Structure formats: C-alpha cells, structure tokens
C-alpha cells in the first residue's frame, strides 16, 4: 500500500523521515536495530541539510529578483530613495522562491542570509551600473556637464556654510585656523580627485547598506517561510 502524508496527503517513500512536500515528520517502525540506526542517521541528515544551500537554484532565484530590485535601487530610478526596502524585499522573495522550487521543509537563518547576500550583490552591481550609465549619458550624451558641475559646486558651498555655522562660537585664532582648513577642504572637494573620492565613498557606503538590508531580508524570508513550513516536533 502506498504511504501518504496525513497532513497534505501527498505520496512519500516508506523509509522517508519527513514529507518532502510539507515537512511533517513521519513515523517509521522497525524491529531491526541496524535499520533503526539508519533511520536515526537520516533524521540527523535532514537537520543538517537545513543549513545547506543548493547554489544553482539559489542563484537563479537571486537573479530573478535582483534584476527588478537593482533597477529600482539605481540613481536613475524615480523611487531609488526607497532602495533599501526594495533590496530587503527582493532578498526575502528570493528565499521564498528558492524554497518553493526546492521544497525543503525549512532552511536556517544562516542559509537565508547567504541567499540574501547573493541577491544583494547582483542587485547592487546592477543598481550602480545603471546609475553610472545614466550619469555618463547625462554628462556626455546629453551635454549637461556644466549643469552637473554647478550642482556639485552648490552642494560643496552648502556644506561649507554648515561647517562655518558650527565654528561660529570659536575664538579669533581658532576661527582663523578653522577657516584655513575649510578652504583646503573646499579646494579638494572641487578638484576632480576630490569629487571622484567622495562619490566613490558614497557608492561604497550605499553598497554596504544594500548588502546589510539584503542579508536581513534573506534572514526574514527564511524565518517567515520556516514558520509556515517547519514541522512541529
């Protein structure tokens, strides 16, 4: 007689410890000591497998969600300011898609974090590639270099005004020294190297934030799917 799961009524192998569909533990009766030991080893293997990731399907799931997330997170997107939330949601959905395709009973938070990080790496690379391409087209294709430089000078001037307001209560000697430092910093920020350095730091910082939210989204996805599918033992 074919064995079926009492929860989801799907067919299962007689020697299976868990239902491959819903993850419900199955009762396995045996009077043979060697077979009982083999069943125990299979149970332990199932527990260890929860922390493992099948990388080919995981990468496919990550790429599926990384494409829209990367475009939404890019500077060229009108909703790019919400990029952190797009990234976290995409990572959580990648874990959900992976689990639906592979049908494990559950995965650990660590496995979810790894899948989320893969999603974040792909999406962050696409986001900044799209943003960089948009800036290149805007500067050289649409000939808006002068406008972009003027915008940068305005931002630098605003930052200098803020720094000057912070040092308003200093004494004459300290104020003179602070003014000299502000002048050097302003000259550096207006130079090509300074502009490139600040933009590079901004990209690195934003990338770290995106990866952090991607890892959190992956862990959240594993936790939510685990609550729905993890068997009660």
Image (cartoon, rainbow, N blue to C red):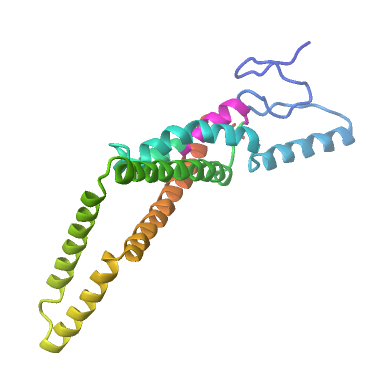
Residue 47 location, x and y as percent? 68, 40
| 99 in magenta | yes
Outermost residue on the bottom side: it is: 173
| 145 in magenta | no
In the picture, the quarter occupied by the C terminus is top right
In the foreground, 221 or 77: 77
Q: Residue at x 42, y 38 (%)?
A: 70
Q: Left or right: 228 with respect to 165?
A: right
Q: Residue at x 16, y 66 (%)?
A: 162
Q: Residue at x 52, y 38 (%)?
A: 222
Outermost residue on the top side: it is: 1
Residue 124 in sight in this render: yes
Q: Left or right: 51 with respect to 197?
A: right
Residue 43 location, x and y as percent? 73, 37
Q: Main secondary structure of the magenta part?
A: helix
In the foreground, 226 or 133: 133
In the picture, the quarter occupied by the N terminus is top right
Q: Left or right: 80 with respect to 155?
A: right
In the foreground, 101 or 67: 67
Residue 132 location, x and y as percent? 38, 46
Q: Residue at x 83, y 38 (%)?
A: 37
Residue 53 location, x and y as percent? 64, 40
Which of the 4 quarters of the picture holds residue 159? bottom left
Q: Left or right: 31 with respect to 110?
A: right
Stretch in magenta: 91-104
Which of the 4 quarters of the picture holds residue 40? top right
Residue 106 in sight in this render: no
């Amino acid at each position: 007689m074919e064995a079926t799961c009492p929860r989801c009524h799907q067919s299962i192998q007689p020697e299976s410890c868990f239902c491959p569909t819903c993850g419900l533990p199955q009762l396995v009766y045996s009077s043979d000591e060697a077979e009982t030991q083999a069943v125990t080893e299979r149970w332990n293997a199932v527990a260890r497998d929860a922390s493992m990731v099948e990388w080919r399907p995981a990468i496919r799931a990550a790429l599926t969600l990384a494409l829209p997330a990367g475009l939404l997170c890019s500077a060229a997107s009108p909703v790019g300011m919400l990029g952190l939330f797009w990234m976290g949601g995409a990572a959580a959905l990648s874990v959900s898609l992976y689990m639906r395709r592979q049908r494990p009973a559950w995965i650990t938070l660590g496995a979810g974090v790894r899948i989320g990080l893969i999603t974040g790496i792909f999406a962050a690379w696409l986001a900044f590639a799209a943003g960089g391409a948009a800036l290149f087209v805007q500067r050289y294709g649409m000939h808006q270099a002068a406008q972009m430089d003027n915008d940068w000078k305005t931002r630098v001037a605003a930052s200098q005004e803020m720094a000057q307001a912070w040092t308003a209560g200093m004494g004459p000697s300290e104020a003179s020294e602070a003014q000299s430092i502000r002048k050097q910093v302003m000259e550096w920020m207006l130079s090509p190297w300074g502009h490139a350095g600040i933009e590079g730091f901004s990209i690195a910082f934003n990338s770290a934030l995106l990866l952090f939210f991607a890892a959190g989204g992956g862990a959240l996805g594993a936790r939510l799917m685990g609550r729905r599918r993890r068997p009660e033992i």
